[in-house]
Image (cartoon, rainbow, N blue to C red):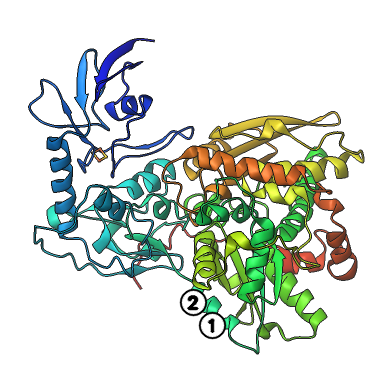
């Protein structure tokens, strides 16, 4: 490894050749502001177009200022990162960016989280000396994401996420000069593009140009309606991140406080999507075993590997991009969508209320869930199984708006029966968690033996694509895992070409899985935050008295009392779905 020595703000440092000045400065504790630059270390995600020039520094001997995010450190370099010349240049760059930025900071959904706003404060920009022409692009509202292009600063982080990381290809720069925008092809609406609504563009957008559709207003309205029984379900990854919105360390579990807050907000029943995740394992695990045993008996009609189907961004992806493979994902609905019919067809009946008077709300780390709950096949006579889906961020806003002192809340318990869950369901929130949960149940059902150890550490981690073989008492089960849709694409291409021999594959659309979902508190490129959230879920799993889905007594009761058996008639009717070929449905104007 070749090293280079340089001096930054009077501090000497030695870094590997090829390191940028931005990275080298970090080694001596110097932060250089950035805007277009974005990275998620460990996941090989990086945006470095060098276009915004906010990160400029002075390099001795060079006439022009150099962008720190793209300039490589070199032997003997002397760098000044905060000289008067540098500060003035950064301020001018920012003033120019702000000259055509809408002054809507008071009402912008990104207020408080806007990187542009933070930079203006950091650089002391108090007025904008330039009068630029204002962009007046139409607002594009899809079922899950809103594009407000007037707030776009052309950093192109969203384009990098959409094309390079997720390989979705919904967003790219079109037009030139002042007319340049990041948009779907032919400047069509997002809804007419192959967008999966994974929300990763929202996660990395530094301004309010890309935001989620707000369902929190609808939730407030139904909470105020005395005719409605309002039930809420909370996804596993939410509890590992919500605390960040209240100043807690990433990875602090706030399960009990979250439940208490939801009760204070006025929900009639606070339930857990984890319960439905246990149910998902019962159905998906049974489907895996069913396909596997038929395959082992030589049934040529069976297609393996089975692909997990919990993630709506992933479902949208294969419906658009790999429709020919749509018969291999599990037909099990996602936990969110399993919860809906159980609440409205089982729990509502137990309470003696009409399903139309029950409103099911979900809190999700995900933006695509907003779209998922609006899908026609998840409605009964026009009534959605899940009415509204709010993100972790929207829940935090609701708590703040209601003046609830989150930190002072006691820990409270979920309501029964749809709030009871096992450790297996909690880890659904991180990459590798769904397949680990499935293995815990499938192993015991297939072999008839008890697992000595329920932790499958070989399935954990953050490598983009992982594989492991699990020994089902002499039968090797080959498992594949991918997080991020670009990685999923690689596995799907292999399946298409017959290059892999997995029995089961878990796919989550977002880097890191749901802990890194598009609806989570903004991580601003800090991959350590994602690791801490994952560790929190594994901690909650380890502390649960029951850690296998098939041992959840309330799930056992639900099958006995209502569903019958996994993959039975009622389960098929309520808990399974089918997929569509959406490859032809994009870029067509109606
Ligand atoms: Fe370096 Fe934009 S952050 S040029």
User: Depth check: 4 or 164 in front?
Assistant: 4
Please tell me the numbered disc located at residue 221.
1
Disc 1 versus disc 2: distance between alpha carbons?
Answer: 6 Å
Label 2: few (<14), some or many (≥20) within 10 Å?
A: few
Taking 192 as reference, is 183 left or right?
A: left
Counting from the top left corner in percent of width and height, residue 12 is at: 29, 17
In the picture, the quarter occupied by the N terminus is top left
The image position of residue 112, as x and y in percent, is 38, 59
Left or right: residue 187 compared with residue 168 = left
Q: Can residue 158 be spotted in the picture?
A: yes
Where in the figure is residue 339, as x and y percent of width and height? 70, 66
- Residue 404 found in image quarter: bottom right
Residue 589: percent from the left, percent from the top? 33, 69
Residue 377 vertical placement versus 75 (above, below): below
**What residue lies at 60% left-to-right and 32% top-to-bottom?**
466
- Specify few, some or many for label 1: CA neighbours under 10 Å numbering under 14, 14-19, or 20 or more: few
Residue most toward the bottom? 227
Q: Is mark 1 within 8 Å of ligand 1?
A: no
Give me the residue at 52% from left, 56% from top.
246
Residue at disc 2, secondary structure: helix
Q: Secondary structure at mark 1?
A: helix
Q: Is residue 492 visible?
A: no
| Res. 217 mark | 2
Is 536 drawn above or below residue 208 in the view shown? above
Q: Is there a contact, CB below 8 Å, between mark 1 and mark 2? A: yes
Q: Residue drawn 74% across and 69% down? A: 573
Pick out the residue farthest to the top.
2
Q: Could you say which is closer to the camera, residue 126 or residue 258?
A: 126
């Amino acid at each position: 490894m070749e090293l280079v020595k340089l001096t930054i703000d009077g501090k000497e440092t030695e870094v590997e050749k090829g390191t940028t000045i931005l990275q080298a400065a970090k080694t001596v504790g110097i932060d250089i502001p950035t805007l277009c630059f974005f990275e998620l270390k460990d996941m090989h995600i990086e945006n470095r177009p060098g276009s915004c020039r906010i990160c400029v520094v002075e390099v001795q001997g060079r006439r022009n200022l150099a962008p720190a995010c793209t300039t490589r450190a070199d032997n003997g370099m002397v760098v000044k990162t905060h000289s008067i010349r540098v500060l003035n240049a950064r301020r001018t760059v920012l003033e120019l960016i702000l000259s055509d930025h809408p002054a809507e900071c008071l009402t912008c959904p990104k207020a408080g989280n806007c990187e542009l706003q933070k930079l203006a404060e950091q650089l002391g920009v108090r007025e904008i000396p330039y009068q630029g022409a204002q962009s007046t692009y139409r607002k594009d509202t899809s079922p899950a994401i809103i594009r407000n292009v007037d707030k776009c600063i052309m950093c192109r982080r969203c384009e990098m996420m959409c094309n390079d990381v997720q390989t979705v290809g919904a967003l790219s720069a079109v037009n030139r000069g002042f007319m340049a925008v990041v948009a779907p092809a032919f400047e069509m609406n997002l809804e007419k593009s192959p967008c999966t609504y994974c929300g990763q563009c929202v996660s990395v957008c530094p301004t309010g140009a890309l935001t989620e559709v707000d369902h929190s207003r609808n939730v407030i309205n139904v909470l105020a309606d005395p005719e409605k029984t309002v039930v809420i379900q909370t996804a596993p990854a939410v509890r590992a991140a919500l605390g960040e919105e209240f100043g807690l360390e990433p990875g602090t579990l706030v399960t009990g406080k979250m439940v208490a807050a939801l009760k204070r907000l006025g929900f009639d029943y606070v339930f857990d999507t984890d319960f439905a995740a246990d149910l998902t394992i019962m159905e998906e695990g049974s489907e895996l075993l069913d396909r596997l045993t038929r395959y082992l008996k030589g049934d040529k009609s069976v297609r393996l590997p089975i692909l997990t189907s919990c993630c709506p961004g992933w479902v949208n992806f294969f419906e658009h991009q790999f429709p020919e493979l749509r018969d291999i994902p599990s037909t099990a609905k996602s936990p969110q969508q399993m919860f809906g019919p159980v609440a409205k067809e089982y729990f509502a009946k137990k309470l003696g209320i009409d399903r139309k008077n029950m409103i099911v709300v979900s809190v999700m780390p995900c933006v695509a869930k907003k779209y998922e709950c609006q899908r026609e096949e998840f409605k009964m006579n026009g009534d959605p199984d899940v009415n509204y889906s709010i993100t972790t961020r929207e829940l935090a806003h609701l708590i703040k708006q209601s003046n609830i002192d989150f930190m002072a809340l006691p820990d409270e318990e979920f309501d029964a029966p749809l709030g009871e869950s096992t450790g297996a369901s909690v880890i659904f929130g991180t990459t590798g968690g769904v397949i680990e949960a499935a293995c815990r149940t499938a192993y015991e059902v297939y072999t008839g033996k008890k697992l000595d150890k329920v932790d499958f550490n070989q399935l954990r981690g953050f490598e983009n694509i992982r594989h492991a073989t699990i020994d089902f008492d002499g039968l090797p089960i080959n498992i594949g895992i991918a997080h991020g849709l670009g990685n999923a694409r690689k596995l799907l291409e292999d399946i298409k070409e017959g290059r892999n021999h997995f029995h089961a594959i878990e796919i989550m659309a977002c880097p890191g899985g749901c802990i890194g979902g598009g609806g989570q508190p903004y991580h601003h490129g800090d991959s350590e935050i994602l690791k801490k959230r994952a560790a929190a879920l594994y901690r909650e799993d380890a502390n649960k008295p029951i850690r296998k889905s098939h041992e959840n007594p309330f799930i056992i009761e639900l099958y006995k009392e209502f569903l019958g058996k996994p993959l039975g008639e009622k389960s098929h009717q309520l808990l399974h779905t089918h997929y569509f070929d959406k490859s032809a449905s994009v870029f067509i104007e109606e």
